[in-house]
Image (cartoon, grey):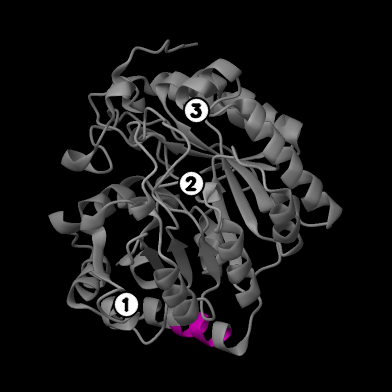
Amino acid sequence: MTGPVMTATRRANQELNIAEFQERRTELASRPLALFVELTRNCNLKCPSCRSAGPFLPEWNMSDEVFRTVADELFDSALLVDLRGYGESTILKNFPRAAHRVMDSGARLRLVTNGQVNKPELWDRMMAEHAVVVLSCDAASHDLFATLRAGGTLARLRETASTLVHHRDAHGAPRDLLSLYVVVSRPNLHELADIVTLADDLGIAQVSLAPIQIGTDHPWHLGHDVATVARSLDAATDRGRELGVRVQLASSLDESLNLDDDIKKMCMHPWAYAYISHEGRVGFCDHLIGLAKYTFGSLTEEPFMDIWNSERFQRLRRQHAEQDLRDEFSPCRWCYKRRYVDFEHLVHPSYGDHLVNTETRARLWTGQDAPACGSSFLGADQAETPASRRVLPIVTR
């Protein structure tokens, strides 16, 4: 897969950032390798596992001033710029302009989208530039898709995916530019293999799986039925090998199923990642998007490098380096128990050795005599919507 345009500035920053990470420096001269720019917190869907319904709020969109600040200061040194946040970027009129600004800089563009808005002209350039597009897809049947992706339709996702595939193939771009991302919960366990079939039908080469982040007492939590989780994962991987679709895990689906040797031993995010909220606040992790308590300062009040080397950012790096994570950064403890490599290898190549997928591992779980996971990612801060408590048929096989 072709990467970013490796200018002298970008190459020097990557080398310095990796060196500072390896030395566990807390104060950095390098800038982040990966940026997550939250253009909006507004969304066109009302997924029951994500948020309650609400009106479109203009104040939830990133201002042009904040975007220019981020672009002017950080795009030229970043390898990857991901234009997503807690909302859906493609609903914005100025989304194409932001995407072109990333590509014009030479950084690689990455987009995670629910696939409900089709933008053929933009997809054409993105596939020509080898941008990475991840389509969020939690079901293969129309009815379950409409339930889990309330307000969206599987037909619209198919249309967007087909357009992206057309432009990808027209430019002779790598097949793995496009993937499906599945949030696995008890309601969709029985459809995991069918989602792999859907990917193959669409011409998409990878399906990534991650467990739903929800309270442990919630009926959708995977810990309530680990045996079905294991069977469904096996069915999906068998289908993937049969069809030539790579199935990858972003984390173990339950701690009792861990491939322990592949769980992250050291997270690079505090050194190499920066999340910029729609308000201009700076955080450190794409898994903590939308949570102000894990951001450390605002670009509307101080320069990026002052925030990047602030006392709290340095404390975060120190606690990671010492493997002594306090309650202040409690979600990081969950990741050290469960998280695999997702796409860190795109900016830090050595992480590619621990990708957990059907091309690198014979099996994607190991059965152990361990209890089902009794914790959730955000612990006491784990939020849920009233809609997620509505009874859905949960199929077990």
**Magenta-drawn stretch contains 13:** yes
Residue at (66% x, 77% y) in the render: 5
Looking at the image, is mark 3 or mark 1 earlier in the sequence?
1
> Residue 348: image x %, image y %?
51, 69
Left or right placement of residue 350 versus residue 373 in this view: right
User: In this view of the protein, can residue 32 be seen by the observer?
Assistant: no
Q: In what element is the residue under mark 3? A: loop
> Residue 383: image x %, image y %?
24, 36
Badge 1 amino acid:
Arg
Q: In what element is the residue under mark 1? A: loop
- Tell us which disc is closer to us: 3 or 1: 3
Residue denoted by label 2:
88
Residue at (38% x, 63% y) in the render: 275
Residue at (84% x, 56% y) in the render: 172
Rendered position, 164 above or below 95:
above
Residue 24: assigned label: 1
Residue 151: assigned label: 3
* Real-space Cα separation, disc 3 to disc 1, in angstroms: 45 Å
Left or right placement of residue 311 versus residue 148 in this view: left
* Real-space Cα separation, disc 2 to disc 1, in angstroms: 35 Å
Left or right placement of residue 326 versus residue 346 in this view: left
Q: Residues within 10 Å of mark 3 (few under 14, many from 20)?
A: few
Badge 2 amino acid:
Glu
What's the magenta bit mostly, secondary-structure-wise? helix
Dividing the picture into quadrants, the one containing residue 28 is bottom left
